[in-house]
Image: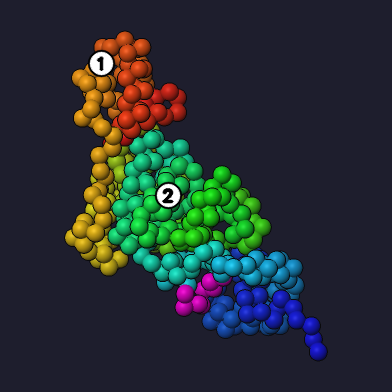
Amino acid sequence: MALSTPKDRDEAHWLALLHGPRALSRQLPALLERFGSPRGLFAADAEAWRGFPRPVRDYLAGPDWAAVERDLAWLDAPAHHLLVFTDAAYPRLLSEIPDPPPALFVRGDPACLRQPQIAIVGSRNPTASGRETARDFAQYLAETGLAITSGLALGVDAAAHQGALAAANGSTVAVTGTGPDRVYPASHRGLADAIAERGALVSEFAPGMPPLPANFPRRNRILSGLSLGTLVVEAAVRSGSLISARFALEQGREVFAIPGSIHNPLARGCHRLIRDGAKLVETADDILEELGPLAGVSLEAAREDTPEDFPAVGAAGNLDGLQVRVLEAVGFEPTPVDMVVVRTGLTPDAVCSMLLVLELHGLIASTPGGHYSRAR
């Protein structure tokens, strides 16, 4: 009796496909039509592979079964899944993009990938108000039933995931640029665990894949491809977030951008998107007006069933006149202390003392470089 091998398991030939040259996955629909399945492709003979590039023919003749065995070991753990292109559970929107991944490694609940989703992306080094805006938009939209999709990166991505997790019954999807057995950045391991409990971590890369720079632009097409639309919170002109927005446009999805101060370099990418046709967004309801009908979300119901959009922060009513003057001198963009001194006419010592009070009230936040910005 023949010994069992990785090739005997249903997922094995799909996994072998993932470890082959990219030409194999890029031609997936044509290959499935011709050979019926990955198993049929690998079982064919050299004559059937004629016309394929030499590296492809060589790989088909000797797939990396050792790597497949490692993948299968990962899949054997609880809450670990593989969704292949032909599965009924494979996300329909993702299957419609020009270059869909042949399979997805999923840690968590694969069912949430079929929820209506909105991607929220932005700078890895946002301003305090940018981070807060991403979190609040995510929480509000998650309350309406939209899953929040982002990339597990520092900054806006993390804030978006955290906002979704703060919503009652909110769910969130993290599309990663590593194998499903790795968390990048490592500081987000706790966040990744929480996402796996309330949503899913998704990757097209097999276990063991490190965070290579080339992986992240590739994963952005999945991030936008899963979603009805993409919201850019803060982004420089040259930014990975704009790559996600470009993919969304190419995929026929909506693109939204939040404007910012002309003095904030992280607003320039959003301003460029708006000039190029992205919808300018001031409130989460602006997004629901566009996506609500597609997602089955009623704007009126969303307003009734979710907390008031962007509640006031802090206790401005408890401030004295000079503290209010300092607060009004701090912009929503990062503002240097020297500028606050000039705007208020107060001494540097007085300004610094009042800035500390305002920060303790939650009305402002310190930002890199010793600057401060308003918290809405």
Task: Name the residue: 23% across, 49% down.
Answer: 308
Left or right: 158 as drawn, with respect to 20 = left
Q: Position of residue 33 (x, y in %)?
A: 53, 81
Q: Quarter of the image holding residue 303? A: bottom left
Q: Is residue 70 above or below residue 48?
A: above
Residue nearest the viewer, comparing 15 with 363? 363
Left or right: 251 as drawn, with respect to 195 = left
Label 2's element? helix
- Residue 344 is tagged as 1
- In the picture as drawn, the residue positioned furthest to the bottom comes out as 1
Task: Name the residue: 20% across, 58% down.
Answer: 304
171 falls in the magenta region: no
Residue that mark 2 sits on: 162
Q: Is residue 316 above or below residue 152?
A: above
- In the picture as drawn, the residue positioned furthest to the right comes out as 1
Q: Position of residue 158 (x, y in %)?
A: 46, 47
Image quadrant holding the N terminus, namely bottom right
Q: Amino acid at mark 2?
A: Gln
The kind of secondary structure the magenta stretch mainly shows is loop
Residue stretch in magenta: 82-89
Task: Name the residue: 42% across, 38% down.
Answer: 126
Judge the density around disc 2: few (<14), some (14-19), many (≥20) Cα neighbours within 10 Å. Answer: many
Q: Amino acid at mark 1?
A: Thr
